[in-house]
Amino acid sequence: MSATLEKAIEEARTLSPVELQQLRALLDSLLAKSGPAMTEDEFEAYLAAKGIIAPVNRSNGEDGDDEEWEPNMVTGQPLSEMIIEERW
């Protein structure tokens, strides 16, 4: 917490109930004026710019590999059945 915020909190604790209501009304109006919330992509970009997370790389299927992908056909017993048998 910044020193400025700590000082503001200390000052707020000394206010009368009427003054606290006025402060609350002011804070509510300031918060209501804020812009729309960030999208998930905007938030990820913000965190990446701050260095908090690594940049998110999404290809969104642009390379075309997803359309051509086909699963490998495997013969034999399904893996899930093999696991169940080994556990018994």
Image (cartoon, grey):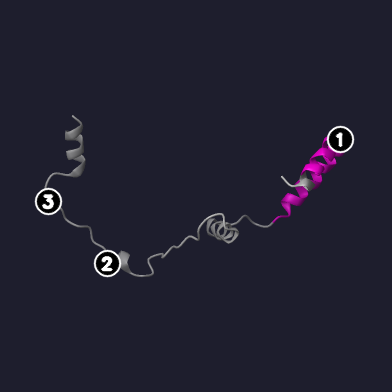
Q: Secondary structure at mark 2?
A: helix
Residue 46 sits in which quadrant? bottom right
The residue indicated by pointer 2 is 68
Question: Does residue 85 appear left or right of residue 56 in this picture?
Answer: left
Q: How many marks?
A: 3
Question: Does residue 49 appear left or right of residue 9 in this picture?
Answer: left
| Residue 54 drawn in magenta | no
Residue 21 sits in which quadrant? top right
Q: Which portion, as a residue range, is magenta?
A: 6-34
The numbered mark, 2 or 3, whose residue comes first in the sequence reads 2
The residue indicated by pointer 1 is 14
The numbered mark, 1 or 2, whose residue comes first in the sequence reads 1
Q: Sort mark 2 into few (<14), some (14-19) or many (20+) by Cα contacts within 10 Å.
A: few
Q: CA distance from mark 2 to mark 3?
A: 22 Å
**Residue name at image x 48 percent, y 60 percent:** 56
Q: Secondary structure at mark 3?
A: loop
